[in-house]
Structure formats: C-alpha cells, structure tokens
Image (spheres, grey):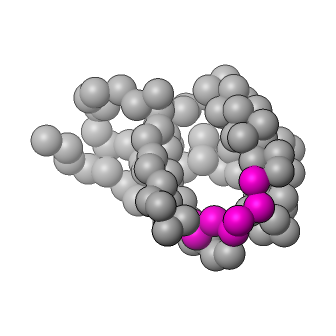
Amino acid sequence: MFKASLTTPYYAVAFSSVRTREDKGYSEMDDLVYAEVEKMPGYLGHEGTRQQDGFGIHISYWKDLESIQNWKENSLHKQAKRMGEEQWYDSFKTRICKVEKEY
C-alpha cells in the first residue's frame, strides 16, 4: 500500500477509468494484480478510489521509468489490461508523472 512519505523524485502512474456493469472475474484479477505488482522492483505503493457512477482513479508510485516499463511488460498486467478493455472498462486513460515535490 501507499507509504506516507516517499523520497523525491519518483514517478506516479495515474490510471483513470469508467467501469462497465460487468464484474465477473474483476475482483479475482484485481487481487492477482496487486499480489504481482507488490513483487516488482521499483514499486513504491498505490492508492485509489471509485465513485458510485463508475469513475475511478488508481495511482501507483514508482522509483523510475524503467520500473514502470517493466510493469507494463509484465504478462499478468498485459492479461488484466486486455480483459479490462474487453469487459470491465467503458473508457480509461493512463498518465505518467514525475513527482518532484510533496508536502
């Protein structure tokens, strides 16, 4: 999970999405993805929320761009993304940001 204070600079990957009504397999995949990402070198934590209308945002924190790229290439992550596109999300966008300061 998210750590209270991280050493800057670090990177944030913001994943915004709007869910479909389809839930079959979503929670199970979510659990698998979190278990996998926590093992990834350079992963620093995450936080997120989802509104009742289906809009949500998930932010993961990373040491560097190489760590983000390694996660993007992870086979389970690719499978989850593919299933998300096909079943679980009406729309989504990923943004990568460099965090230079926090307070």
Q: How many marks?
A: 0
Q: Position of residue 90 (x, y in %)?
A: 68, 75
Residue 32 position (above or below residue 56): above
Identified at 54% across, 49% down, the residue is 65
Identified at 75% across, 54% down, the residue is 23
User: Is residue 73 at all visible to an observer of this figure?
Assistant: no
Q: Is residue 20 magenta?
A: yes
Quarter of the figure with the C terminus: top left
Residue 63 position (above or below residue 93): above
User: Is residue 99 at all visible to an observer of this figure?
Assistant: yes
Is residue 77 left or right of 91 when viewed as pictured?
A: right
Along the viewing direction, whichever of 6 and 26 lies nearer the viewer: 26
Identified at 32% across, 43% down, the residue is 9
Along the viewing direction, whichever of 5 and 100 lies nearer the viewer: 5
Which residues fall within the magenta stretch? 17-23
Is residue 39 left or right of 65 when viewed as pictured?
A: right
Identified at 20% across, 44% down, the residue is 102
Q: For the view shown, which residue lies furthest in the bottom direction?
A: 91
Q: Position of residue 50 (x, y in %)?
A: 48, 55
Residue 56 position (above or below residue 69): below
Q: Position of residue 84 (x, y in %)?
A: 76, 61
Is residue 9 left or right of 52 when viewed as pictured?
A: left
Is residue 13 left or right of 92 when viewed as pictured?
A: left
Residue 43 position (above or below residue 59): above
Along the viewing direction, whichever of 56 and 16 lies nearer the viewer: 56
